[in-house]
Image (cartoon, rainbow, N blue to C red):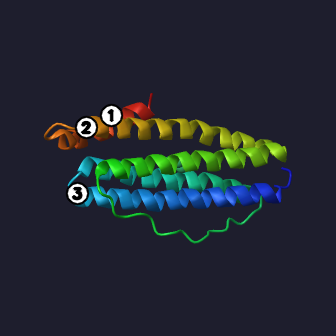
Amino acid sequence: MTKIASQVVAELTRQFNQELSAAHAYRALSLWCEQANLKGFARYFAKQAGEELEHAAKMTSHLIDRGVLPQEQAIPAPKTEFESLLELARQAQAMEERNTQGINAVYEAALQTKDYAVQVLMHWFINEQVEEEAWCLEMVERIEAATCAGGLSDLDRHIERYLEEGENK
Ligand code: FEO
């Protein structure tokens, strides 16, 4: 295996820390929902937090396989207060859009350095981000549409099934 270029190490390091930061942020969204009695959303975001840790692990495993010790960085405190579930959902959507930009930046570095192994690793993430942005959009649209009395409670009961069916399409 060829030596990994420093700019690819830098991009993978930035990105796996961004994945850890996303896990931290999803945990905060889950806690907000739990305290708002939105247990379906709380469970869904808790699962997303776990998935972000798995995403970080895919990248750190690759670095270790290439002989690089992954460097964890400080993770900023996530936003914890929201005016509404809609504001919270839009925050998740913005976070995933930033994450897509981060994945693309890793891929760009891998293209520039002809690092074929990281290019293939990033193919999985590029596809994953299509799913991540799709469920965020569906979530925002479903919350916007839940305007009648009891609409949000009803949505909360079904949100995991709706979004997980979308993920498994
Ligand atoms: Fe690691 Fe939500 O993407």
Instruction: Determine the CA span between mark 2 and mark 1.
Output: 6 Å
Residue at 18% x, 44% y is: 153
Label 3's element? loop
Q: Is mark 3 within 8 Å of ligand 1?
A: no
Residue assigned mark 2 = 158
In the rendered image, residue 82, in percent from the top left (x then y), is placed at 33, 59
Amino acid, disc 1: Tyr
Q: Nearer the viewer, residue 82 or 19?
A: 82
> Does the residue at mark 3 contact the one at mark 1 (Cβ under 8 Å)?
no
> Does the residue at mark 2 contact the one at mark 1 (Cβ under 8 Å)?
yes
Label 1's element? helix
Q: Which of marks 2 and 3 is in front?
A: 3
Instruction: Determine the CA span between mark 3 and mark 1.
Output: 20 Å
Relative height, residue 65 to residue 70 (above, below): above
Image quadrant where residue 83 sits: bottom left
Label 2's element? helix
> Does the residue at mark 2 contact the one at mark 3 (Cβ under 8 Å)?
no
Amino acid, disc 3: Ala
Mark 3 burial class by Cα count in 10 Å: few <14, some 14-19, many 20+: few
Q: Which of 134 and 46 is in front in this view?
A: 134
Amino acid, disc 2: His
In the rendered image, residue 104, in percent from the top left (x then y), is placed at 67, 44
Q: Which of 61 and 55 is in front in this view?
A: 55
Q: Is mark 2 within 8 Å of ligand 1?
A: no
Residue assigned mark 3 = 36
Residue assigned mark 1 = 162
